[in-house]
Image (tube, rainbow, N blue to C red):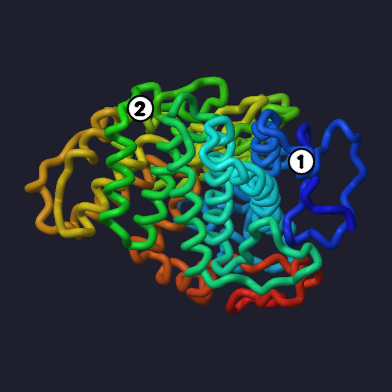
Amino acid sequence: MKQHTLLHIAAIVTIGLSACSKQLDDVAPNTKIAFSQLTKNNLPLVINGAKLALTNNNAFYTYYALQDVMSDDFQSLGFTAYENNNIPSNDNTLVPAYRQPYQCIANANMVIQYATQFSGDSTVNTALGEAFLLRGFSYMLLSECFGDVVIIKGDENPKSRPPRNPATEVNQFIESDLKNAIDHLPAYTNAVSGSKQSAQLLLARFYLNHGRYDEALSMANAVISSGKFSLQSNFGDIFKSSVNSPEAIYKINETSTSTFYGLPNIYGQGGGTNSGQAGSGNTWADSNLVKSYEPADIRRSYFARTKGGAIVDTVYFITKFPQELTPSYVVCRYSEAFLIVAEANARKGTVDVTTYNQLRSARNASTVNNTDFATPAAFLSVIEQERRREFIGERLRWSDMQRFGKMNTWLQSFGQPVTHVLMPIPSREFFINDNLVQNADYSR
């Protein structure tokens, strides 16, 4: 077996643990580097390789949207197993959700191993910080989908077949990585580069999902008080790869060969190349959610009410993700900090509508008063609905449903066990690592 520490700079070929027993394809010598060839100057290229690994030739949209399809935000005829929350372990769409984050982790590990040799050297700090950021984000993706996952630090025996680490250990690893990212990354300059604020916001999200509200408040308030961002009226710019929107804190772009790839491929109304409309027209937004926008709300205009390419009914398709040759995936954005502050305060027993109103005002929607809510629980219900309006299609709803206590009832409505909050480990992984154990209520 070739060493799994090879990196493809132009197009990623590094493999993670799940595929380490397979041969790597031969590539030209000028498109790969080994650990021994790393220098301070080429670390940014390796970071780019980590991002390419996560997207892997237009793979990101194929798994980015899966949990949103599973949630109450969308209905789908194209992803029926996910729509019904009963995914077979041999489903091909499941594979990149497991494989791609590990490929990103393998690249990030190389940067971390190399750069930590130069402790205190400012010339490697930015690359080191973004490596921690990408590794932490990749483990967030894995743990949200699969629960317990194998932690790979890059110094393991490539022939080893370790078991899955408990979620508690994975969570500690994520927190450590994001804290390290905060310590090493500079302040925000643009959305396609990791920044201190992007790590702070991801950590705020992590803390909120794990009930650590004081820490979530601290991180979210740090992002707001940084002075680096502002809420804008041009909402659609957030999702454009070519625009450095002051609301997009961190995004990952991928190179495509067609404007029909990216999230429009999943959420588009369809119609084919002649119509210019991407998608198959078989995944659409919940109509009650769309109708909950006020008429003047600027977000309401990012839905198209029409018949899809695969259905006869008139439904709502989300259009905020533009058709571009460089599809863009917003990992975290400014408005999330405002809603985290509002929610964390409410969960601590305080109704404070300040940040909620700031976001609503920026979206040209009506505002509220503290006295409008008899209890913090009443305000939390409103916050939940606002999060749905703000983040539809951005893979936050599945975690929100868990946090707001909606998950068990939702799964049971499909006749599925509550353990189906997690996806199954892809069946192919058990041929590679026989020490893995499948998630509950799924077969190998």
Query: Most extreme residue toward the left, as rendered?
Result: 371
Q: Is residue 311 visible?
A: no
Of the pair 409 and 359, the residue shown nearer to us: 359
**Percent x, y for residue 98?**
66, 58
> Which disc number belongs to residue 229?
2
Identify the element where label 1 is drawn: loop
The disc labelled 1 sits on which kind of residue?
Answer: Ile
Q: Is residue 81 left or right of residue 187?
A: right
Question: Image height check: is 140 above or below 429?
Answer: above
Query: Of 170 and 240, which appears nearest the observer?
Result: 170
In the picture, the disc for residue 12 is: 1
Give x and y (percent) for residue 100.
68, 50
Residue 393: mark: none
Look at label 2 and name its amino acid.
Phe
Residue placed at 26% from the left, 46% from the top? 341
Quadrant in which the C terminus is drawn: bottom right
Task: Judge the density around disc 2: few (<14), some (14-19), many (≥20) Cα neighbours within 10 Å.
Answer: some
Q: Residue at x 31, y 31 (%)?
A: 226
In contact (CB < 8 Å): disc 2 and disc 1: no
